[in-house]
Amino acid sequence: MAKAFTKEDDDLLEELGVEVETKREGGRTPREERIIAGFEEIQRFVEEHGRPPQHGQDRDIFERLYAVRLDRLKEQPEALELLNKLDHQKLLSGGTPTGDASSDELDDDELLAQLGADALSEGSVEQLRHVRTATERREAEEIANREKCEDFANFKPLFQQVQKELEAGIRQTRSFELKAEIKAGAWFIVGGQKAYVAEEGETFTTAQGRTDARLRVIFDNGTQSNMLMRSLQRALNKDDAGRRITDPEAGPLFSGEREEDDQPSGTIYVLRSKSDHPMVAANRDVVHKIGVTNVPVKQRIAGARLQPTFLMADVEVVATYELYNISRTKLENLIHRVFSSARLEITIEDRFGQPAIPREWFLAPLFIIDEVVEKIRAGTITRYVYDPKAASLRQV
């Protein structure tokens, strides 16, 4: 049994240059007080969370530090003897240490260095500054570590199309919600850039029992990132300006799909002109005005012969489609975008002799207009534009 040193022995050892750990008032050495204080922090954590601290990169840095500290305490006989009467939560008697308990010392700075955190400030571990978990650092790196997208030329038209649809109101931006689905084909705004999820890998389960997947995300500045779905999700949630871009949806448009609570929005109308203008007369069967109105079509075309928008001539109603629960302006912009390459370039003099350029007349056969209406009904029209040379719709 080790002999206890007397006061005289301590003085002698001190003169010989041997450091002696003296007991303070209350009978405890500074080291013992540090052990007790560190254990009390663990106890407070358990009281607050209802469980012992656990290891894991997704855990808070304080919890990880407490978990390593608890493991080391369990392996030190001196600590077990000292803390036995204080352990009313039975933390030292249960479980097998799982952390790195290779050192007998319980230095918080050392533990934090092993956990990848900055050093402590003066005092308790709760005063930790500038700490990020390894998970947080990895997520930040995934956002920042982008590489050049070698095949960006294939994606650039998609970004341009989405921008046009945003400007036309066909797509909207919405605040990102945690439950919002991230999948291939989805669009977002993160870090001030539009982001397109081009590919989604196989879904897997993380060590924490959560599902995740590797994504290929293309950004509008010509870069890409192979990031985890949950990393993108967290980046969007942390970004105050993070948004999701909605899919283009036509909604219930036509009378055949009307439900009891649907609200009428207006009518798509297709007109044929009776003008004797040489260009119109030569192409009468394919020159059509396509518009949207919220008044009866007969009322809309009354006095057509006096209005440049109707080519200063009477018109014939070729087709109409009733609308429900949809923005007339947005739909009209969508239709005009599809047919923009076939717009009739014509100048008409109004009744005062002033030149006017009508914008809603197109060189498009009626069967193509019907096809466009069907794709609007199906919600797929945003993938197409009209090709006047081939007289058909083509995908973009």
Image: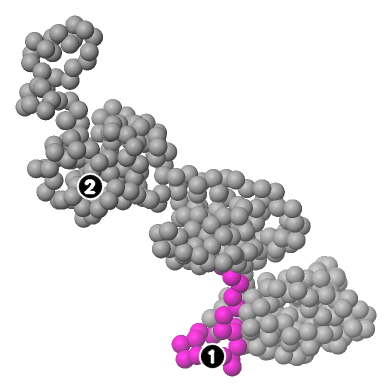
Look at the image and tell me in which quarter the C terminus lies.
Answer: bottom right
Residue at x 56% of width, y 90% of height: 257
Q: Secondary structure at mark 1?
A: loop
Q: Which mark is in front, 1 or 2?
A: 2
Amino acid on which disc 1 is placed: Arg
The scheme the figure's colours follow is: one colour
Q: Residue 99 location in percent, x, y? A: 34, 45
Residue at x 21% of width, y 55% of height: 50
Q: Nearer the viewer, residue 224 or 162?
A: 224
Is 270 on the left-hand or right-hand side of 59?
right
Is 352 on the left-hand or right-hand side of 237?
right
Q: Nearer the viewer, residue 350 or 150?
A: 150
The number of discs equals 2
Residue at x 49% of width, y 86% of height: 262
When the figure is inspected, residue 319 is found, relative to residue 181, above or below; the finding is below
- Can the viewer see residue 300 in this picture? no
- Label 2, on which residue? 45
Q: Secondary structure at mark 2?
A: helix
Look at the image and tell me in which quarter the N terminus lies.
Answer: top left
Q: Which numbered disc covers residue 258?
A: 1
Amino acid on which disc 2 is placed: Phe
